[in-house]
Image (cartoon, rainbow, N blue to C red):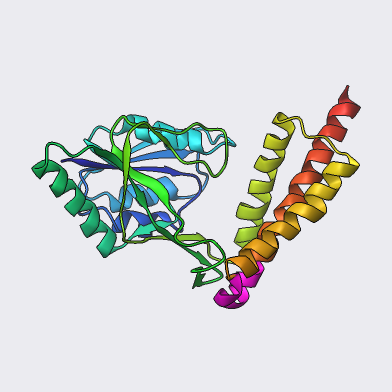
Amino acid sequence: MSLSVAIATHNEEKNIERCLKAVYNWVDEIVVVDGASTDKTVDVIKKLDTDNKVKVHVTDNPPMFHKNKQKALDRCTKDWILQLDVDEVVTEELKNEILNSASRRIQDDKEETIAYWIPRLNYFLGRPLHKGGQYPDYTIRFYKNGVAKFPCESVHEQVKINGEIGYLKSDLLHYPYETFDAYIQNGLIRYSILEADIMQKDGVKPSVINFLKYFIILPKWWFLKTYFRHKGFMDGFPGFIFSLFSALRYWFAYILLYEKLRKKKVLK
Protein backbone atom coordinates (compact mmCIF):
# COMPACT_ATOMS: atom_id res chain seq x y z
CA MET A 1 0.00 0.00 0.00
CA SER A 2 1.22 3.46 -0.88
CA LEU A 3 0.07 6.47 1.14
CA SER A 4 -0.61 10.13 0.34
CA VAL A 5 -1.17 12.91 2.85
CA ALA A 6 -3.56 15.69 1.75
CA ILE A 7 -3.39 19.14 3.38
CA ALA A 8 -5.00 22.49 2.59
CA THR A 9 -3.26 25.60 3.95
CA HIS A 10 -3.70 29.36 4.24
CA ASN A 11 -1.23 31.50 6.19
CA GLU A 12 -0.04 28.61 8.36
CA GLU A 13 3.69 29.26 8.66
CA LYS A 14 3.49 28.71 12.43
CA ASN A 15 1.78 25.30 12.21
CA ILE A 16 2.90 23.64 8.99
CA GLU A 17 6.31 22.45 10.22
CA ARG A 18 4.87 20.54 13.21
CA CYS A 19 2.24 18.90 11.01
CA LEU A 20 4.63 17.86 8.23
CA LYS A 21 7.39 16.56 10.50
CA ALA A 22 4.96 14.10 12.11
CA VAL A 23 4.33 12.31 8.78
CA TYR A 24 7.18 13.18 6.43
CA ASN A 25 9.43 10.16 7.02
CA TRP A 26 6.83 7.39 6.64
CA VAL A 27 4.45 8.47 3.84
CA ASP A 28 5.05 8.33 0.09
CA GLU A 29 3.60 11.66 -0.97
CA ILE A 30 2.32 14.90 0.57
CA VAL A 31 -0.08 17.06 -1.44
CA VAL A 32 -0.56 20.63 -0.24
CA VAL A 33 -3.14 22.99 -1.75
CA ASP A 34 -2.32 26.49 -0.54
CA GLY A 35 -5.01 29.17 -0.60
CA ALA A 36 -2.84 32.10 -1.71
CA SER A 37 -0.98 32.46 1.59
CA THR A 38 0.55 35.89 2.18
CA ASP A 39 2.97 34.66 4.83
CA LYS A 40 5.88 32.19 4.50
CA THR A 41 3.82 28.98 4.49
CA VAL A 42 5.04 27.82 1.08
CA ASP A 43 8.65 28.79 1.85
CA VAL A 44 8.60 26.73 5.07
CA ILE A 45 7.22 23.74 3.16
CA LYS A 46 9.92 23.94 0.51
CA LYS A 47 12.63 24.21 3.16
CA LEU A 48 11.37 21.09 4.93
CA ASP A 49 10.95 19.06 1.74
CA THR A 50 14.44 17.55 1.58
CA ASP A 51 13.29 14.39 -0.24
CA ASN A 52 10.96 16.07 -2.76
CA LYS A 53 7.86 14.38 -1.34
CA VAL A 54 5.68 17.48 -1.22
CA LYS A 55 3.62 18.70 -4.17
CA VAL A 56 2.40 22.27 -3.62
CA HIS A 57 -0.45 23.75 -5.65
CA VAL A 58 -1.24 27.43 -5.05
CA THR A 59 -4.80 28.56 -5.70
CA ASP A 60 -7.36 31.02 -4.27
CA ASN A 61 -8.77 30.93 -0.72
CA PRO A 62 -12.54 30.29 -0.91
CA PRO A 63 -14.76 31.05 2.13
CA MET A 64 -15.76 27.37 2.16
CA PHE A 65 -12.29 25.99 2.89
CA HIS A 66 -13.40 22.40 2.20
CA LYS A 67 -13.13 23.20 -1.51
CA ASN A 68 -9.35 23.35 -1.20
CA LYS A 69 -9.35 20.17 0.87
CA GLN A 70 -11.15 18.45 -2.00
CA LYS A 71 -8.60 19.82 -4.47
CA ALA A 72 -5.87 18.23 -2.34
CA LEU A 73 -7.68 14.86 -2.38
CA ASP A 74 -8.11 15.05 -6.15
CA ARG A 75 -4.35 15.54 -6.64
CA CYS A 76 -3.29 12.54 -4.54
CA THR A 77 -1.86 9.66 -6.58
CA LYS A 78 -1.26 6.90 -4.00
CA ASP A 79 -3.49 3.99 -2.94
CA TRP A 80 -4.67 5.49 0.35
CA ILE A 81 -5.05 9.05 1.66
CA LEU A 82 -4.56 10.50 5.13
CA GLN A 83 -6.23 13.91 5.12
CA LEU A 84 -4.95 16.34 7.74
CA ASP A 85 -5.64 19.88 8.84
CA VAL A 86 -2.47 21.87 9.26
CA ASP A 87 -3.07 22.33 13.01
CA GLU A 88 -3.17 18.57 13.60
CA VAL A 89 -0.36 16.21 14.63
CA VAL A 90 -0.17 12.45 14.04
CA THR A 91 1.13 10.67 17.13
CA GLU A 92 3.52 7.73 17.01
CA GLU A 93 0.68 5.47 18.19
CA LEU A 94 -1.62 6.65 15.39
CA LYS A 95 1.15 6.24 12.82
CA ASN A 96 1.69 2.61 13.87
CA GLU A 97 -2.03 1.90 13.82
CA ILE A 98 -2.39 3.34 10.31
CA LEU A 99 0.51 1.24 9.03
CA ASN A 100 -0.82 -1.88 10.77
CA SER A 101 -4.25 -1.32 9.23
CA ALA A 102 -2.57 -1.15 5.85
CA SER A 103 -0.70 -4.37 6.55
CA ARG A 104 -3.91 -6.18 7.49
CA ARG A 105 -5.54 -5.09 4.23
CA ILE A 106 -2.65 -6.44 2.19
CA GLN A 107 -2.88 -9.83 3.94
CA ASP A 108 -6.68 -10.11 3.74
CA ASP A 109 -8.17 -9.87 0.23
CA LYS A 110 -11.68 -10.01 1.73
CA GLU A 111 -11.21 -6.84 3.77
CA GLU A 112 -14.05 -4.48 2.82
CA THR A 113 -13.20 -1.45 4.96
CA ILE A 114 -12.46 1.52 2.70
CA ALA A 115 -12.23 4.30 5.31
CA TYR A 116 -11.58 4.86 9.01
CA TRP A 117 -12.87 7.14 11.75
CA ILE A 118 -10.03 8.58 13.85
CA PRO A 119 -10.56 9.97 17.38
CA ARG A 120 -9.37 13.56 17.65
CA LEU A 121 -8.19 15.16 20.89
CA ASN A 122 -8.79 18.92 20.81
CA TYR A 123 -6.64 21.39 22.75
CA PHE A 124 -8.09 24.70 23.97
CA LEU A 125 -6.25 27.37 25.98
CA GLY A 126 -3.34 24.95 26.27
CA ARG A 127 -5.36 22.05 27.70
CA PRO A 128 -6.89 18.93 26.09
CA LEU A 129 -10.69 18.86 26.26
CA HIS A 130 -11.68 15.38 27.41
CA LYS A 131 -15.24 16.38 28.32
CA GLY A 132 -17.95 18.74 27.10
CA GLY A 133 -18.82 16.39 24.26
CA GLN A 134 -15.48 17.21 22.63
CA TYR A 135 -13.83 13.81 22.96
CA PRO A 136 -13.55 11.52 21.17
CA ASP A 137 -14.11 13.95 18.32
CA TYR A 138 -14.30 11.28 15.61
CA THR A 139 -13.43 12.38 12.08
CA ILE A 140 -13.06 10.38 8.84
CA ARG A 141 -9.48 11.05 7.74
CA PHE A 142 -7.98 7.81 6.42
CA TYR A 143 -9.51 6.31 3.29
CA LYS A 144 -8.92 4.61 0.00
CA ASN A 145 -8.10 6.97 -2.86
CA GLY A 146 -11.19 7.93 -4.83
CA VAL A 147 -13.88 7.03 -2.28
CA ALA A 148 -14.13 10.33 -0.33
CA LYS A 149 -15.88 13.54 -1.33
CA PHE A 150 -16.43 16.79 0.58
CA PRO A 151 -20.01 18.07 0.05
CA CYS A 152 -18.74 21.64 0.67
CA GLU A 153 -22.01 22.66 2.30
CA SER A 154 -21.19 22.99 6.02
CA VAL A 155 -18.17 24.20 7.95
CA HIS A 156 -18.00 21.08 10.17
CA GLU A 157 -18.92 18.47 7.57
CA GLN A 158 -17.33 15.05 7.10
CA VAL A 159 -16.38 13.54 3.77
CA LYS A 160 -19.04 11.34 2.19
CA ILE A 161 -18.09 7.67 1.95
CA ASN A 162 -20.10 4.99 0.15
CA GLY A 163 -18.83 1.83 1.82
CA GLU A 164 -17.64 0.22 5.04
CA ILE A 165 -16.02 2.56 7.58
CA GLY A 166 -13.91 1.19 10.42
CA TYR A 167 -12.50 2.78 13.58
CA LEU A 168 -8.96 3.48 14.70
CA LYS A 169 -8.18 3.85 18.43
CA SER A 170 -5.19 6.21 18.60
CA ASP A 171 -5.70 9.97 18.91
CA LEU A 172 -5.06 12.62 16.30
CA LEU A 173 -3.93 15.70 18.23
CA HIS A 174 -5.64 18.97 17.29
CA TYR A 175 -4.24 22.44 18.19
CA PRO A 176 -6.71 24.82 16.52
CA TYR A 177 -6.04 27.97 18.57
CA GLU A 178 -2.79 28.77 20.31
CA THR A 179 -4.30 31.83 22.01
CA PHE A 180 -7.75 33.12 22.98
CA ASP A 181 -7.33 35.96 20.49
CA ALA A 182 -6.75 33.40 17.73
CA TYR A 183 -9.91 31.59 18.80
CA ILE A 184 -11.98 34.78 18.59
CA GLN A 185 -10.59 35.87 15.22
CA ASN A 186 -10.12 32.55 13.42
CA GLY A 187 -12.70 30.40 15.16
CA LEU A 188 -15.68 32.16 16.64
CA ILE A 189 -15.99 35.00 14.13
CA ARG A 190 -15.11 32.91 11.09
CA TYR A 191 -17.57 30.14 11.91
CA SER A 192 -20.25 32.66 12.85
CA ILE A 193 -19.95 34.25 9.41
CA LEU A 194 -20.29 30.86 7.72
CA GLU A 195 -23.23 29.98 9.98
CA ALA A 196 -24.92 33.26 9.02
CA ASP A 197 -24.44 32.40 5.33
CA ILE A 198 -26.08 29.01 5.90
CA MET A 199 -28.96 30.64 7.79
CA GLN A 200 -29.51 33.05 4.91
CA LYS A 201 -29.42 30.19 2.41
CA ASP A 202 -32.02 28.34 4.49
CA GLY A 203 -34.31 31.35 4.46
CA VAL A 204 -33.96 32.34 8.13
CA LYS A 205 -35.12 35.93 8.70
CA PRO A 206 -35.13 38.23 11.73
CA SER A 207 -38.30 37.82 13.77
CA VAL A 208 -39.41 37.64 17.37
CA ILE A 209 -39.48 33.84 17.22
CA ASN A 210 -36.02 33.57 15.65
CA PHE A 211 -34.64 36.14 18.09
CA LEU A 212 -35.80 34.00 21.00
CA LYS A 213 -34.47 30.88 19.27
CA TYR A 214 -30.96 32.21 18.55
CA PHE A 215 -30.51 34.46 21.60
CA ILE A 216 -32.15 32.41 24.34
CA ILE A 217 -33.07 28.84 23.45
CA LEU A 218 -30.09 27.59 21.41
CA PRO A 219 -27.31 29.23 23.50
CA LYS A 220 -28.89 28.02 26.75
CA TRP A 221 -29.38 24.51 25.34
CA TRP A 222 -25.80 24.33 24.06
CA PHE A 223 -24.20 25.56 27.31
CA LEU A 224 -26.25 23.25 29.53
CA LYS A 225 -25.52 20.30 27.25
CA THR A 226 -21.76 20.79 26.97
CA TYR A 227 -20.96 22.12 30.45
CA PHE A 228 -23.27 20.01 32.60
CA ARG A 229 -24.65 17.04 30.68
CA HIS A 230 -21.28 16.27 29.03
CA LYS A 231 -19.31 17.39 32.10
CA GLY A 232 -17.34 20.21 30.52
CA PHE A 233 -16.75 21.53 34.06
CA MET A 234 -14.23 18.71 34.52
CA ASP A 235 -11.93 20.44 32.01
CA GLY A 236 -11.55 23.40 34.38
CA PHE A 237 -11.45 27.00 33.21
CA PRO A 238 -10.84 26.10 29.51
CA GLY A 239 -13.92 23.88 29.63
CA PHE A 240 -16.06 26.73 30.93
CA ILE A 241 -14.78 29.22 28.36
CA PHE A 242 -15.30 26.74 25.53
CA SER A 243 -18.90 25.99 26.54
CA LEU A 244 -19.72 29.68 27.03
CA PHE A 245 -18.25 31.13 23.86
CA SER A 246 -19.27 28.28 21.59
CA ALA A 247 -22.84 28.91 22.83
CA LEU A 248 -22.50 32.60 21.99
CA ARG A 249 -21.87 31.80 18.34
CA TYR A 250 -25.65 31.75 17.89
CA TRP A 251 -25.75 35.42 18.92
CA PHE A 252 -23.02 36.41 16.49
CA ALA A 253 -24.55 34.45 13.60
CA TYR A 254 -27.95 36.05 14.13
CA ILE A 255 -26.47 39.56 14.33
CA LEU A 256 -24.44 38.97 11.17
CA LEU A 257 -27.52 37.65 9.38
CA TYR A 258 -29.49 40.74 10.46
CA GLU A 259 -26.73 42.99 9.15
CA LYS A 260 -26.48 41.12 5.83
CA LEU A 261 -30.23 41.31 5.18
CA ARG A 262 -30.41 44.98 6.22
CA LYS A 263 -27.63 45.92 3.81
CA LYS A 264 -29.26 43.89 1.06
CA LYS A 265 -32.52 45.74 1.59
CA VAL A 266 -30.77 49.14 1.52
CA LEU A 267 -28.98 48.27 -1.70
CA LYS A 268 -32.29 47.37 -3.36
Q: Which x, y percent locates residue 15?
A: 44, 57
Could you say which is closer to the camera, residue 258 or residue 10?
Answer: 258
Q: What residue is at 46 percent from the left and 33 percent from the top?
A: 150
Residue 93 lies, with reference to residue 209, above or below; the image says below
Could you say which is closer to the camera, residue 89 or residue 223?
Answer: 223
Q: Which quadrant of the structure image shows residue 142?
A: top left
Q: Which quadrant of the structure image shows residue 206?
A: top right
- Tell me the chief SS of the magenta region: helix
Q: Which x, y percent locates residue 186?
A: 61, 53
Query: Is residue 85 visible to us here?
Result: no
Instruction: Based on the picture, tell me whether residue 238 belongs to the magenta stretch.
Output: yes
Q: What residue is at 36 percent from the left and 46 percent from the top?
A: 141
Could you say which is closer to the camera, residue 172 or residue 86?
Answer: 172
* Left or right of 113, for residue 107: left
Q: What residue is at 20 percent from the left and 50 percent from the top?
A: 101
Q: Which quadrant of the structure image shows residue 184?
A: bottom right
Residue 135 lies, with reference to residue 103, above or below; the image says below
Instruction: Based on the picture, tell me whether residue 74 belongs to the magenta stretch.
Output: no
Numbered range of the magenta stretch: 232-241
